[in-house]
Amino acid sequence: MKITSIDTFLMHAGVPDSGGWGARNWLFVRVHTDEGLYGVGESSGWPRVVETAIRDLTPLVVGQDPFHIESIVQQLQVAMMGHGMTGVVGAGAITGIEMALWDIKGKALDTPVWNLLGGKVHDTLRLYTHAHTPDQCLRYMERGFDAFKTGGVTEPLGKIRTLRDELPDEIDLMADVHGPPWLTVPDAIRLGKALEEFDLLFYEDPVAPDIPGAIAEVARNVNLPIAAGERHAWTWGVQQLIEDHIIDVVQPDTGRAGGLNAMRKIAALAETHFVMFAPHDGSLGPVAEMAAVHLCATLPNFLILEHLEDDVPQRYEVMEPQPEIRAGHIVVPDRPGLGVDIVPEAIAHYPSSGNIASPRTRHYVRSRAHRTRWLSASPKRADFN
């Protein structure tokens, strides 16, 4: 069997004519072979740019045996060396191709991808979803969810406090403050200390991830599990965070970490340091989510999987079949390969329309005045408005 071509499918994945979070794009990949089998994958890491990278890489992949997944990935990494540290764009391009190769291999061998990755440890995987009000949580609790993430850069402490006051004690809460570049280490520590009383499952991206030492300083001073990793690629991107015991939960993004093999290596490194594995899934489409399901099903250190319940309508149109979700858990499928396929006709209804969020400031690092307003609450109240 030989690879003959690669197709890409770029689409708008937000509310039409919206910016910010609504400017999401999804990029799906389809790798074809001379035996009629094809596999599907998904890439993130700036999808519109990644699509161009995949087109550059395609001639290197055509003609190769799709079963030799690690060899192909190594060749693509070498091919990118001349472009410097390619980061999540290069890793995202490789990820979509690599994911599709696993799908091909599973289909050819008539077995699920999780079986190729070592076999199941879990039949279902616990999910958490995003919610910012008690009413949202209660609605999702009726469907069986018992873990919620909130936060952002607007009143993260107030949101957590409200949820903890209104929800049963057994509900798990997580705070994600997105590590903006203007959030200093002292401020992240102050916020983290204020969050300690709420017994969080984890405190996510307390500062920008560019400098591991900054996250380490927060971790040393805050008595909460620290989570990070969604903006990094490859094992090397999170190596120091894991090996120096800076984080307690690693969160590689299934669309841009470098592929399922790369994520499996990250999970193995994490396991040796007693770090839990909880992939990022907040901006991803449904194919990457299903790939994460196959991987996480094989991992003894899997903690929880991010899931957008009630996402944009197109999520439920562009992939089939849809995942089976029971009582806040996603069922690990038994179908060959990834067990899903994309619907090109549906994708075509949502052409790409931008893929960046407009900044609210001209400066990468906010001024002191902006920081002062964000920390306007008194030390006793610490609402972090």
Image: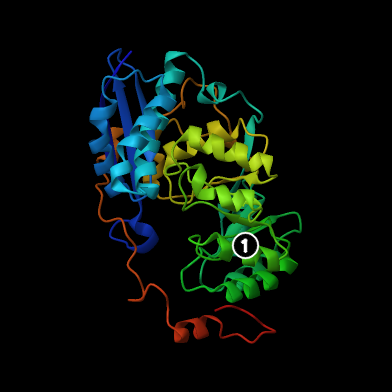
* Residue 162 shows in the view: yes
Residue 69: x percent and y percent?
A: 42, 25
Quarter holding residue 288: top left
Q: Residue at x 63, y 48 (%)?
A: 243
Q: How is the image coloured?
A: rainbow
Residue 35: x percent and y percent?
A: 30, 12
Q: Is residue 121 left or right of residue 101?
A: right
> Residue 229 or 198: which is nearer the viewer?
229
**For residue 174, above or below residue 299:** below
Residue 313: x percent and y percent?
A: 39, 47
Q: Quadrant of the C terminus?
A: bottom right
Using a 10 Å C-alpha cutoff, classify the residue at mark 1 as few (fewer than 14 neighbours), some (14 to 19) or many (20 or more). some
Give amino acid for label 1.
Ala
Q: Is residue 335 left or right of residue 159?
A: left
**For residue 36, above or below residue 220:** above
**For residue 135, above or below residue 327:** below
In what element is the residue under mark 1? helix
* Residue 324 shows in the view: no
> Residue 338 or 185: which is nearer the viewer?
185
Instruction: Give the residue pinned by disc 1.
Output: 216
Quarter holding residue 59: top left
Q: Is residue 119 left or right of residue 166?
A: left
Q: Quadrant of the N terminus?
A: top left
The count of marks equals: 1
Q: Residue at x 33, y 48 (%)?
A: 84
Q: Residue at x 61, y 79 (%)?
A: 383
Residue 235: x percent and y percent?
A: 51, 42
> Residue 214 or 164: which is nearer the viewer?
214
